[in-house]
Image (spheres, helix red, strand yellow):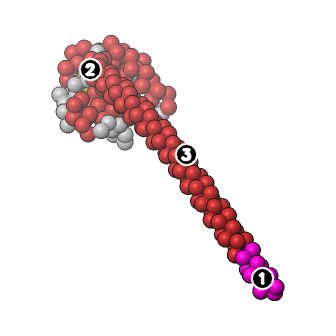
Amino acid sequence: MQNKLQVLTEQLYNQGLAKGREDGDRYLEDARLKAAETIADADAKAAAIIAKAEKEAADLKAKAEADVKMASAQALQAMRKDIENLVVAKASTQETLADPAFLKEIIRAVAEKFSAAESCDLSLVLPESLKAKLEPWVKAELSAALGSPVEVKFSGKMAGGFTIGPKDGAYYISFTDKAFDELIAAYMRPVTRKILFGE
């Protein structure tokens, strides 16, 4: 009887063990399937996130490239306009600095400031081309307005404008077309200077 009981116990044990293994294997397979589904789902979500990010990056790159192209076109247009304005300003400045009426006004204003600030005799250099129009005015009207004679010289190297300063030559102020060109050229790149001034 003991044998039968032992056999029966072993049989029940083996059946329970087999059932437990079968259930364990089934649970393990279910877990593997769920894990595979979860991984596949995560991979799909990751691929969707990457695709969305790549699309957003491509859109952003396209927008940035379009903005850069538009900004560079606008900057180029503005630079062309600035160069055009400089060329026009240079031409009109040269004409203005060769206009006797304009020069008379400016020379008188500057000379009066010199006269008021320091009592010194003035020396003036003007373009040779304006000698006939300005020499009588300087010697008569300007000297009378300042209350002292103004020394005037004429230079063939000067196309327009003037230089003015004390007779002793301690310093002078230049309002020549060359001084204007040098002032403007100091703020330009070499290529632009070459276009405008032929340097």
Q: Callout 2, which amino acid?
A: Ala
Count every numbered label the image shows and give the total: 3
For label 1, the residue is: 4
In this view, the residue in front, 2 or 54, is: 2
Q: Of the residues tagged 2 and 1, which is closer to the observer?
A: 1
Residue drawn at x 73%, y 71% as measured from the top left: 16
Image position, residue 9 (x, y; %): 77, 79
For the residues labelled 1 and 3, the Cα–Cα distance comes to 60 Å
- In the rendered image, residue 5 lying in the magenta stretch gets the answer yes
Q: Please say if the residues under marks 2 and 1 sit with CB atoms less than 8 Å apart.
A: no
Q: Callout 1, which amino acid?
A: Lys
- In the rendered image, residue 52 lying in the magenta stretch gets the answer no
Residue drawn at x 42%, y 38% as measured from the top left: 58
- Left or right: residue 38 versus residue 119 is right
For label 2, the residue is: 91
Image position, residue 182 (x, y; %): 30, 35
Residue drawn at x 29%, y 15% as measured from the top left: 100
The image quadrant of residue 22 is bottom right
On the question of residue 134 being in view, the answer is: no
- Location of the C terminus (image quadrant): top left
In this view, the residue in front, 104 or 159, is: 159
Image position, residue 95 (x, y; %): 27, 17
For label 3, the residue is: 45
Magenta residues, as a range?
1-12
